C-alpha cells in the first residue's frame, strides 16, 4: 500500500523550521551572555594569577634562601661566643681561687713580719738597757738602739699597709668569686634555653620557608588548571558555531523536503521515499545536534564551575603563617641581645675584679724593693753590732748576743722575702693569665657575633618583608576570589541555561519522529524504497562538517550514529 | 604589536578568537564576513589573517585569493579556521594561498604557538 500524502506535512515542517529558527536566535543571545560571563570570569582569574605571579617572584627571590643559613650561623656564633665567655668566667673563678690562696700566703708573710717587728722592738729595749748599764762605753751602742726602734716602727708600718691591702683584696675577691659562681651556671642555663628556643623556632620557620618554596609549584598547578579550564570553555563555545551551522542545514533540508512533498492535486508520489529519507536524515541530525549541544553546554558549565572552585587557599594562608613564624623567631633572637647585655654586666664585674690583681702585684713589687732595703739594713746592723761587741770585749757579751739575734732576724727576713718573692711570681703568672682571659671578653672578639647578628637581622627583614608582601597580595587575591564566587552566582547554571535554550529541539524532534512514524505506518516498505546515493547527493550539498556527513551515512545505511567528541584540547593547526 | 585580522560570520567564534589573541598580547581586528574582511585587509596592514571558510557575501577561499592580490599581502600568513576537514577543501584553501588549516574548535595554546612561529 502506498503512502498517501498528508496536506499537513508541509505545515509541520514549517513549524519545525520556525522553532529551530527561534531557538537559534535565543541561543545566540544566551551564548553571547555566557561569553560575557566567561570573559569576566577569565579576567578575575587573570587578576588572581597576576598577584600569584608576583608572590612567586617574591618567593623565588634568592635572598629568601639565605635566612635559615644566616640564623643558623648566628646561633652557632652566639653559642660559641657565650661558651667561650662562660669558660673564661670559669677560668676567672679559678684565678680568683688561686688569688685567695696567694693572699693567704701573704697573710702568713705579714704575720711573720709582724713578729719580726716585735722582735726588733724587744731588741731595741734590750739594747737601751745594755746601753744604760755600759754607761759612756756604750754610747755608740745607743745609735744602734735608736735604729732598731725606728726600724721596728718602719717594719710595723709597712706590714700594716701590706696586711690592709691584702685583706681588702681578699674581701673583694671573695665577693666576686661568690657572685661569679652564682652567675655562670645561671647564664649557662639561659644560653641553653635560648638555644633550645631558637632551635625549635628555626625548625618551624624552616617548615614555613619550605611551604613558601612550594608556592611556585602550587602556582604553576593553579595556573595550569585555570588555563586548561579556560581552554575548555573557548573550545566549548566554538561548539555553538558547529551547532548553528548544523541547525541551518537542517532548516534548509526541511525546506527542500517540503518542496518535494506531493500535494492533493495528484502530483507524483514517486518522491515520497526520497522525502522519507530526507526526514530520516534530519531526524538523526537533530538527535545528534541535541547530543552535541548537551556536550558543549555541559563543558561550558563544568569548566566555569571548575575555575570558580580552583583553590588558592594554600597560597592565601602561607603569608600570614610565615609572618607569625618570623615573629616567633625574632622574639627568640632578641633573647640574644638580652644575654649579651647580661654578659656585658658580668664582664664589667670581672674586669673590675681582675684589675685589682695588677695593683696587688705592684704593691708586692714595691714591698719586695723595700724588703731588700730592710735586709741590707739588717745586715748592716748585724755587722755594726758585731763590731761594737768585739770592741767592747768581755763587756760586749750582751751586745754580741743582741748582734746574733739581729742576725737571726735578718735570716728570718731573708726567708720571708724569698716566700714573698715566690708569691709575687705566682701573682705575675695570674696577671698574665688574666690578660689572656680578658682578651676573650674584649669587644674585638664580639665582632663576628655582631656581623652575624647584622646578617640575620637583614635576612629576617627580607623574610618579614616577603611574608608581609605575600600576605597582602594573598588578601587581595582572596578578595578577588570572593568577588568571583559571589558575583558570578549564575556561573554554575551557565551550562543549564544554555541547554535550556535548546529545549525546543525536543519538540522539533518529536514532530519529526511523529512524521516518520506516519510514513512508516502508511507504507511499511518505505525505508527500503529510497535511493541512498540520491538522498546523499541531495542532502549533503550544504554540509560543512564531517559529523553531518557521518550522521547522514549512518541514517541512510542503518549503522551506529557517530558522536562528536568535544575535547578540552581543541584541534591542532595543520601547516601547509 | 602584532596585528591580526579575524574573519568569521559567527559572533561567538570571533569572540573566542579575540579573547585568545588579546590575552596573548596581540592586537585584533574582526570582520563579519569575507567582504568585510577583504575591505579591512585592503585598508590596514595586518601581520596575519585568521578566517572562516563558509561565510555569506564572500567565502574564505575567495577572500584569500583576493587578499593575495592586494599590495603587500602576498606573504602574510593566513590560517583557515573552519568546521570543514575534507581533503578537497584543504587543497582548495592551499591553492588559494592559505598557510594553514584549523578544524574548529581550535586549541588556544596551539594557535598561539603557531602565530609565534609564523609571525616573527
Image: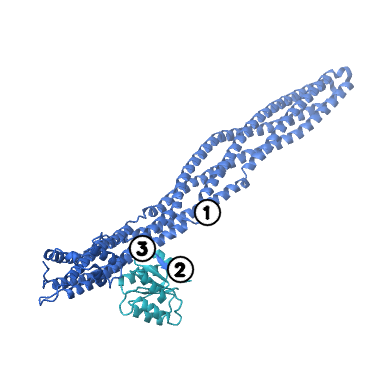
Q: Total of numbered circles in the picture?
A: 3
Q: Residue at x 31, y 64 (%)?
A: A236
* Residue A570 tag number: 3
Residue B6 seen: yes
Q: Position of residue A455 (x, y in %)?
A: 55, 51
Discs 2/1, front: 2
Compared to A56, does A352 lie above or below? above
Q: Residue at x 84, y 24 (%)?
A: A385
Q: Can you identify the residue that label 1 sits on?
A: A458
Query: In the figure, residue A429 lies in which quadrant?
Result: top right
Q: Can you identify the residue that label 2 sits on?
A: B116
* Chain coloured cyan here: B
Residue B65 versus residue A397: which sits nearer the camera?
B65
Q: Is residue B52 left or right of residue A539?
A: right
Residue A501 seen: no
Q: Is residue A275 left or right of residue A233?
A: left
* Disc 3 and disc 1 on one polypeptide chain: yes
Query: Which sits earlier in the primary sequence, circle 3 or circle 1?
Result: 1
Q: CA distance from mark 3 to mark 2?
A: 18 Å
Residue A139 versus residue B9: which sits nearer the camera?
B9
Discs 3/2, front: 3
Q: CA distance from mark 3 to mark 1?
A: 50 Å
Q: Position of residue B35 (x, y in %)?
A: 34, 80
Chain under disc 2:
B
Q: Is residue A252 left or right of residue B17?
A: left
Q: Secondary structure at mark 1?
A: helix
Amino acid at each position: 500500500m502506498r503512502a498517501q500524502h498528508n496536506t499537513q506535512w508541509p505545515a509541520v515542517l514549517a513549524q519545525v523550521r520556525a522553532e529551530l529558527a527561534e531557538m537559534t536566535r535565543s541561543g545566540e543571545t544566551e551564548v553571547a551572555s555566557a561569553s560575557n560571563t566567561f570573559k569576566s570570569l577569565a579576567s578575575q582569574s587573570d587578576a588572581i594569577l597576576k598577584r600569584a605571579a608576583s608572590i612567586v617572584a617574591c618567593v623565588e627571590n634568592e635572598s629568601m634562601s639565605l635566612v635559615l643559613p644566616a640564623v643558623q650561623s648566628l646561633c652557632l656564633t652566639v653559642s660559641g661566643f657565650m661558651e667561650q665567655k662562660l669558660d673564661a668566667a670559669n677560668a676567672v673563678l679559678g684565678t680568683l681561687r688561686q688569688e685567695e690562696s696567694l693572699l693567704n700566703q701573704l697573710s702568713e708573710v705579714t704575720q711573720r713580719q709582724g713578729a719580726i717587728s716585735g722582735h726588733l722592738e724587744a731588741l731595741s729595749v734590750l739594747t737601751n738597757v745594755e746601753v744604760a748599764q755600759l754607761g759612756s762605753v756604750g754610747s755608740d751602742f745607743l745609735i744602734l738602739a735608736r735604729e732598731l726602734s725606728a726600724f721596728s716602727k718602719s717594719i710595723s708600718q709597712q706590714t700594716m699597709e701590706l696586711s690592709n691591702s691584702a685583706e681588702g683584696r681578699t674581701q673583694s675577691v671573695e665577693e666576686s668569686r661568690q657572685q661569679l659562681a652564682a652567675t655562670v651556671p645561671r647564664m649557662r642555663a639561659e644560653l641553653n634555653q635560648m638555644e633550645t628556643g631558637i632551635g625549635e623556632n628555626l625548625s618551624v620557620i624552616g617548615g614555613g620557608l619550605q611551604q613558601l618554596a612550594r608556592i611556585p609549584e602550587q602556582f604553576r598547578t593553579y595556573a595550569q588548571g585555570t588555563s586548561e579550564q579556560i581552554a575548555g570553555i573557548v573550545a566549548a563555545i566554538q561548539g555553538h558555531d558547529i551547532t548553528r551551522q548544523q541547525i541551518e542545514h537542517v532548516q534548509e533540508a526541511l525546506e527542500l523536503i517540503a518542496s518535494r512533498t506531493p500535494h492533493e492535486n495528484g502530483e507524483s508520489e514517486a518522491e515520497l521515499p526520497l522525502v522519507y529519507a530526507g526526514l530520516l536524515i534530519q531526524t538523526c541530525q537533530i538527535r545528534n545536534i541535541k547530543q552535541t549541544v548537551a556536550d558543549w553546554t555541559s563543558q561550558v558549565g563544568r569548566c566555569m564551575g571548575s575555575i570558580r572552585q580552583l583553590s588558592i587557599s594554600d597560597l592565601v594562608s602561607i603569608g600570614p603563617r610565615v609572618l607569625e613564624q618570623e615573629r616567633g623567631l625574632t622574639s627568640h633572637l632578641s633573647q640574644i641581645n638580652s644575654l649579651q647585655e647580661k654578659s656585658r654586666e658580668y664582664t664589667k664585674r670581672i674586669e673590675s675584679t681582675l684589675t685589682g690583681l695588677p695593683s696587688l702585684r705592684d704593691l708586692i713589687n714595691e714591698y719586695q724593693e723595700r724588703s731588700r732595703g730592710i735586709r741590707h739594713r739588717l745586715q748592716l746592723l748585724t755587722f755594726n753590732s758585731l763590731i761594737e761587741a768585739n770592741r767592747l770585749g768581755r763587756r760586749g757579751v750582751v751586745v754580741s748576743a743582741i748582734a746574733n739575734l739581729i742576725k737571726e732576724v735578718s735570716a728570718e727576713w731573708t726567708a720571708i722575702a724569698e716566700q714573698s718573692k715566690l708569691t709575687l711570681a705566682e701573682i705575675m703568672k695570674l696577671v698574665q693569665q688574666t690578660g689572656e682571659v680578658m682578651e676573650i671578653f674584649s669587644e674585638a672578639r664580639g665582632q663576628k657575633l655582631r656581623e652575624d647578628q647584622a646578617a640575620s637581622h637583614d635576612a629576617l627583614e627580607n623574610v618579614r618583608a616577603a611574608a608581609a608582601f605575600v600576605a597582602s597580595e594573598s588578601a587581595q587575591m582572596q578578595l578577588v576570589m570572593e568577588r568571583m564566587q559571589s558575583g558570578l552566582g549564575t556561573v554554575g547554571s551557565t551550562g543549564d541555561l544554555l541547554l535550556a535554550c535548546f529545549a525546543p529541539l525536543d519538540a522539533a524532534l518529536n514532530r519529526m519522529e511523529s512524521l516518520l512514524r506516519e510514513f512508516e505506518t502508511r507504507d511499511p516498505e518505505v525505508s527500503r524504497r529510497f535511493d541512498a546515493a540520491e538522498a546523499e547527493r541531495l542532502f549533503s550539498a550544504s554540509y560543512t562538517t564531517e559529523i553531518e556527513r557521518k550522521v547522514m551515512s549512518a541514517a541512510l545505511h542503518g549503522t551506529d550514529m557517530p558522536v562528536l567528541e568535544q575535547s578540552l584540547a581543541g584541534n591542532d593547526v595543520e601547516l601547509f | 604589536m602584532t596585528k591580526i585580522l579575524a574573519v568569521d560570520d559567527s559572533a561567538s567564534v570571533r569572540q573566542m578568537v579575540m579573547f585568545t589573541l588579546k590575552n596573548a598580547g596581540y592586537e585584533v581586528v574582526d570582520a563579519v564576513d569575507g567582504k568585510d574582511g577583504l575591505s579591512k585587509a585592503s585598508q590596514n596592514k595586518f601581520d596575519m589573517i585568521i578566517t572562516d571558510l563558509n561565510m555569506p557575501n564572500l567565502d574564505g577561499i575567495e577572500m584569500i585569493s583576493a587578499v593575495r592580490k592586494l599590495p603587500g599581502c602576498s606573504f602574510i600568513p593566513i590560517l583557515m579556521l573552519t568546521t570543514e576537514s575534507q581533503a578537497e577543501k584543504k587543497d582548495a584553501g592551499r591553492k588559494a594561498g592559505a598557510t594553514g588549516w584549523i578544524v574548529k574548535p581550535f586549541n588556544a595554546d596551539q594557535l598561539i604557538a603557531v602565530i609565534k612561529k609564523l609571525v616573527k
